[in-house]
Amino acid sequence: MVNTSLYTGLSGLRVHQRYIDVIGNNLANVSTQGFWGSRATFGDMLSVTMRPGSAPTGNFGGQNPMQVGLGADIASIDLNTTQGAFSDTGRPLDVALQGRGFFVLNDGVQNFYTRVGTFGVDRERNLVDARTGYRVVASNGSRITVPVTDTLPATATTSVKFQGNLPATVTGPLEEILASASGFKEGTAATDSTVPGGGGTYNLTAFMGRSLLVSVNGSAQVQVSFPASAFANPAAATAAEIQARFTAANIRGLQITAQPGGQLDFATTKLGSSATLKFDDGPGAAGFLSALGLDARLSSGTETAASLTTSLASLTAREAAYQAGDQILISGTNPDGSAVSDTFIFGTGAGQDGTTLGDMVNFLNATFDSAAVTASLDTTNGTIRLTTTAKGPASLTLTIQDANGNSGNVLWPKFNVSQDGKGPDTATTSIDVVDSLGRTHQITLTFTRTTTNPAWWDLRATMPAAEGTIPQDTISQIRFNTDGSFAVVGGGSTNLLFAFNGLPGTQSIAVDLGTAGAFDGVSMLGNQTTVAAVDQDGFEAGTLLNIAFDTEGRLLGFYSNGRNEEIAQLRIALFPNENGLLRQGDTMFVEAPNSDDAINTTASAAGAGVVRPGSLENSNVDIAQEFVNLIEAQRGFQANSRVITTTDEILAELVNIVR
């Protein structure tokens, strides 16, 4: 049986040689894209049974079998189906699979399966494997034809989608308001009074030939002289004599009134906080003011916002108080532009119109068209306002001025528009739509808030007359819910109808405003306007610019009009037992009895992986592991060779026994 060990050692040499073959093939393909490495597994060969073994019986124990093995053999060589790493090539027709599956190629007779997607285009515009020339199979089983030059025909617009916000805050239409440029104020004069001595006279003996200084409303001081010749008895100067001296000084804006008992009252003609009055002793006349009962303190008037009961003679804007019979001229236009003209006569007598601001407001209401405009006094700021009854633009004007020859006068302010009676709230957007010939037309789309309900809007489309007409240009009553979400179109059709020049018939375009009750389209919130026509489904004709794959294995054509179209989709094949496939070289496989039939699908479906465009899968061979395996195979080979050498030496000794 010595020769048995020879054949046992020989089998060990053979299996380790085969093991080295497998390792060598793996290392040879370490840079081969899409290569799956192999793994060799060993099994022992049938053993020689010297004793089969026995079970325990009676007083005797059992015995184990006694066998001698006859060597080793290759039990299997399996594929390593681990995913390889990816390298980016940047080439649009290079693809790799991340996950399970194989690309399918065909040579006209049978299908081949590979993990390497180095695809290109042949002269017949077929998509082929660049290594073998085999044609790439599409998901429907046909060849893939690549349109190197292609024209994508135009598609007419059938719908327009809107998104964004329409303002919930109403800013129009509004009433037009005409208001005085400044508010009216009721004021008092700056005042002061003398204090006479006994007998209602003043002792001015010490001040003859002296003077007083007077400043009115902040103006330069005016000198009032008191010569002895102006007084019959300086020790008992009368109020009339003193008043005459002030009158002779011609002090502008100062009124002097003599009271019974000899008191003199000084008051500014001007009213309000800007009215001031100040007296001072003249040069060398210290004590003169005290002799008159006056002092050098600054006196000022007061003012408050005017009310309906404020007299026109008490307005701070007056320069002189109105007297009965003074005329105030009223002129202007009604909201419709018709002229208005009348005269307000100051006073309470017959034929006179009143004396207060309230009387003036009533006069304005009687003068203007009462059905179209209302006059009022804003008591918060004292302005007179004219407010139109109707909303929208108006031609309302008003001018108030004094007639010539009046005793009094007021600096009447101008009346300006404080609130423009502008039209309804609007929001405008535009978008290019495409007709059936691929021509684009810019359409302006205007949302207008209805005057009947602030939560309803109308949409109207317009375009240049040179491009055609819009037989149906309005979508009415676009309604919103109380939470601002889109509700419904309450005015009938949601389509616009266009008649473009040069084309027969009309083109209908649906308006997509979003989902009812949702915020995926148009909403009505706050006061911001962001609504816009964001998309339309038509496009112009375009020429092919480039082709590339996506992650679902679809070959897409990219056109000059910004569109992309699917040309074909790669077929991906799955196998129940990938290890059962038969290698055919060039990193390709074919079906084998134990692989079962291919399950044809597409990327990302039925468990297939996703396509990585512009990439190739690298070999999954682990170099470090293969070198370890190589060392193991080498040592195994050495050990088996020692078995043969030792057996040979034993046989030699056996032969030498007969010498």
Image: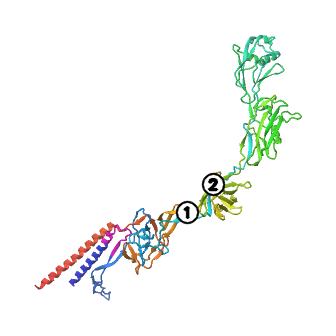
Q: Quadrant of residue 429?
A: bottom right
- Residue visible at 66% across and 64% down in the picture: 506
**Which one is nearer the viewer's eye here, 575 or 588?**
588
In the image, residue 63 lies at what x, y percent?
29, 85
| Residue at disc 1, secondary structure | loop
How is the rendered protein coloured? rainbow
Q: Residue type at mark 2? A: Thr
Q: Residue type at mark 1? A: Ala
Q: Quadrant of residue 201?
A: top right
Magenta residues, start to end: 23-40
Q: Which residue is mark 2?
A: 429
Label placed on residue 604: none
Specify whether residue 290 is in view.
yes
Image quadrant holding the C terminus, namely bottom left
| Residue at the far front in the pictured view | 502
Q: Which residue is mark 1?
A: 541
Position of residue 226 in the picture relative to residue 446 (left or right): right
Question: Counting residues from the N terminus, which is met first, the one under dot 2 or under dot 1?
Answer: 2
Instruction: Specify few, some or many for label 1: CA neighbours under 10 Å numbering under 14, 14-19, or 20 or more.
Output: some
| Residue at disc 2, secondary structure | strand
